[in-house]
Amino acid sequence: MTPVDIITSKEMSDIAQIVKLHDIDVPLVAVYCGSRKGNDPVYVQSAHELGRGLVEAGLGLVYGGAVIGCMGAVADGVIEKNGIAVGVIPEFMMDREVAHGGLTRLHLTDTMHTRKAIMAEYASAFITLPGGLGTLEEIMEIATWRQLYQHEKPMIILNINGFYDKLVEHLQFTAEQGFMKPEDLQRLIVCNTVADAIELLKPIVNMPDTMNVNKI
């Protein structure tokens, strides 16, 4: 793997120089997912299918940079189709989440905050596969940023095997109890299959909130 510099939080004021989107000719989708495989093979299979589907739809990937678990599977799917795969991983996690050796571009960062900011800058949309605490934190943060008008990018929850049924139920209850506006909840689009998610990602440059899709 080509050595890379560590990006620190102090450098983030010039994030456009770090990301260099002009060097990438396809929109990238940020994929949040587990560094573990889960107990059902369907999770890894779906991650791999999503990676291949992104490339077939003319899209690329930005993700957490690891070679393990569902993270590695989605990157493998992209790479097998000769697509663009950008990884972003904190240096302190290199022993836990071994970096993928076949990526188009890899960034090392000093903190998780820097990692997430770089991924968001690259992304034209966000999609969440099954995962653990980190995955939940990532999609909830990006939904919060949308609520605070920090971006207008599509956000998709890929509800493989009904994994997010209880999360969806809780978010609906949160809105019913007055802690979330219905329109903020509705911007989280739920898909049950990879094919449905890819179809929604095709008009990625402009995905209006009024699209007739299955929203929470």
Image (spheres, rainbow, N blue to C red):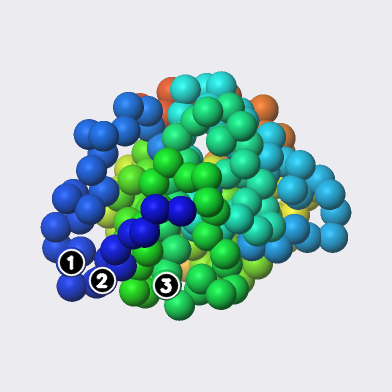
Report the amino acid beneath label 2: Thr
Percent position of residue 125, x then y:
42, 40
Q: Mark 1 vs mark 3: which is more N-terminal?
A: 1
Q: Is residue 3 above or below residue 205?
A: below
Q: Nearer the viewer, residue 178 or 134?
A: 134
Q: Residues within 10 Å of mark 2 (few under 14, many from 20)?
A: some
Q: Are marks 3 and 2 in contact (CB under 8 Å)?
A: no
1 or 3: mark nearer the eye: 3
Local secondary structure at mark 2:
loop
Judge the density around disc 3: few (<14), some (14-19), many (≥20) Cα neighbours within 10 Å. Answer: some
Judging by the rendered image, the residue that carries numbered circle 1 is 11
Point out which mark residue 91 bears: 3
Please state which amino acid type lies under the numbered disc 3: Glu
In the rendered image, residue 37, in percent from the top left (x then y), is placed at: 75, 58
Residue at x-position 44% and y-position 63%: 89
Residue located at (30% from left, 67% from top): 6
Q: Give how far apart the Cα atoms at labels 2 and 1 are.
A: 6 Å
Residue at 57%, 64% in the rendered image = 98
Q: Amino acid at mark 1?
A: Glu
The answer to whether mark 2 and mark 1 are in CB contact below 8 A is yes
